[in-house]
């Protein structure tokens, strides 16, 4: 049985840890509010750029454009968005395992040469431990993501795709639905889907000066907007997961402190009772 001194030291240690977890919970809650504000502002921007791409669906004159053409898939690139730090529950694990499960399912159908581009240290460590081909990594980006960061990633992916080093590009991120609901998603971003549902006709839209110049502007805008939205979605999910994790840690610490306090009080009461008994016994003699 631990001594009273050991129990008291343990209570002090857990109390200190509880204060740290409480502070981290408050920081995560503050960052979450900022991320949610940025995300709500970015979603309409992404929706509008997506409408630009939907306006191209079904057009035969874009089938030969490099960003829309269908290729024999030999090289697949995964852009996986994770965090740089832990203490956020299963957030990082869920998104990395989503990418890995998709890869395993694709290889079962037709083996390909897979490459990983990782945003965040945790994803990089995950794939390196499994000896995956990580060709590039972006650190210190998720919590302070700017549109310029998304443009930098977009240019890198576009260069891989246009050079033939990638035949398909997937983005793996976590979508924010609520503080308690975070959904890991994997979506193909290149080539851009331009197929219409059966029975629908392509929109008769004229582009000035011509379609080629329009695509030179619209495609990079769409890719950057998509990646920017994915970064913000993932950042909000990470902070929400960390807030929940720290809140759970604070609750558990309180339970441990209560349990140790009861044990300490029982031990102290037993020591007092024994001392009284010894004094009474001595007085009787």
Image: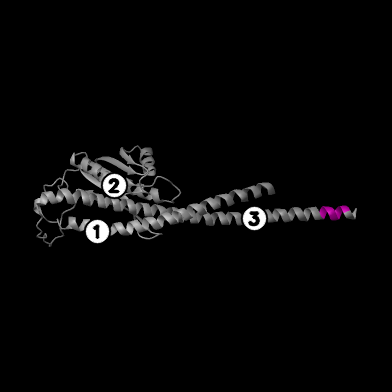
Residue 216 in view: yes
Residue 263 screen position, x and y as percent? 66, 54
Q: Which mark is residue 261?
A: 3
Of tags 1 and 3, which is closer to the observer? 1
Give yes or no for residue 280 being in the magenta stretch. Answer: yes
Q: CA distance from mark 1 to mark 3?
A: 55 Å
Q: CA distance from mark 2 to mark 3?
A: 53 Å
- Closer to the N terminus: mark 1 or mark 3? 1
Q: CA distance from mark 1 to mark 2?
A: 19 Å
Residue found 10% across the figure and 52% down from its top: 211
Q: Are marks 2 and 3 in contact (CB under 8 Å)?
A: no
Residue 22 screen position, x and y as percent? 51, 54
- Closer to the N terminus: mark 2 or mark 3? 2
Looking at the image, how many numbered discs can be counted on the residues? 3
Numbered disc 1: secondary structure: helix
Write the start and end of the magenta stretch as one range. 277-282
Residue 136 higher or lower than 93, as above or below: above
Q: Which mark is residue 47?
A: 1
Q: Which mark is residue 218?
A: none
As drawn, is 110 to the left or to the right of 140? left
Classed neighbour count for the residue bearing mark 2: other residues with Cα under 10 Å, few (<14), some (14–19), many (≥20): few
Give yes or no for residue 24 being in the magenta stretch. Answer: no
Residue 166 in view: no
Q: Which of 90/145 is in front?
A: 145
Q: Quadrant of residue 255?
A: bottom right
Residue 151 higher or lower than 33, as above or below: above
Q: Label 2: which residue?
A: 148
Numbered disc 2: secondary structure: helix
């Amino acid at each position: 049985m631990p001594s009273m001194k050991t129990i008291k030291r343990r209570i002090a240690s857990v109390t200190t840890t509880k204060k740290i977890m409480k502070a981290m919970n408050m920081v995560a809650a503050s960052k979450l509010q900022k991320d949610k504000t940025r995300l709500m502002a970015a979603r309409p921007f992404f929706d509008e750029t997506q409408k630009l791409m939907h306006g191209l669906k079904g057009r035969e004159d874009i089938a030969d454009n490099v960003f829309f053409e269908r290729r024999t898939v030999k090289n697949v690139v995964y852009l996986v968005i994770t965090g740089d730090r832990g203490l956020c529950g299963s957030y990082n694990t869920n998104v990395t395992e989503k990418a890995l499960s998709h890869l395993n399912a694709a290889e079962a159908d037709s083996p390909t040469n897979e490459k990983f581009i990782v945003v965040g240290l945790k994803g990089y460590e995950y794939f390196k431990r499994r000896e995956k081909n990580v060709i590039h990594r972006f650190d210190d980006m998720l919590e302070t993501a700017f549109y310029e960061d998304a443009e930098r990633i977009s240019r890198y992916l576009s260069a891989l795709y246009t050079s033939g080093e990638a035949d398909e590009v997937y983005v793996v991120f976590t979508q924010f639905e609520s503080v308690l609901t975070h959904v890991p998603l994997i979506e193909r971003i290149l080539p851009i889907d331009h197929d219409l549902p059966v029975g629908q006709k392509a929109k008769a839209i004229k582009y000035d000066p011509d379609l080629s110049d329009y695509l030179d502007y619209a495609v990079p805008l769409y890719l950057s907007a998509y990646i920017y939205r994915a970064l913000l979605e993932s950042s909000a999910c990470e902070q929400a997961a960390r807030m929940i994790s720290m809140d759970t840690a604070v609750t558990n610490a309180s339970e441990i402190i209560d349990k140790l306090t009861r044990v300490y009080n029982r031990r102290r009461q037993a020591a007092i009772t024994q001392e009284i008994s010894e004094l009474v016994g001595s007085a009787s003699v």
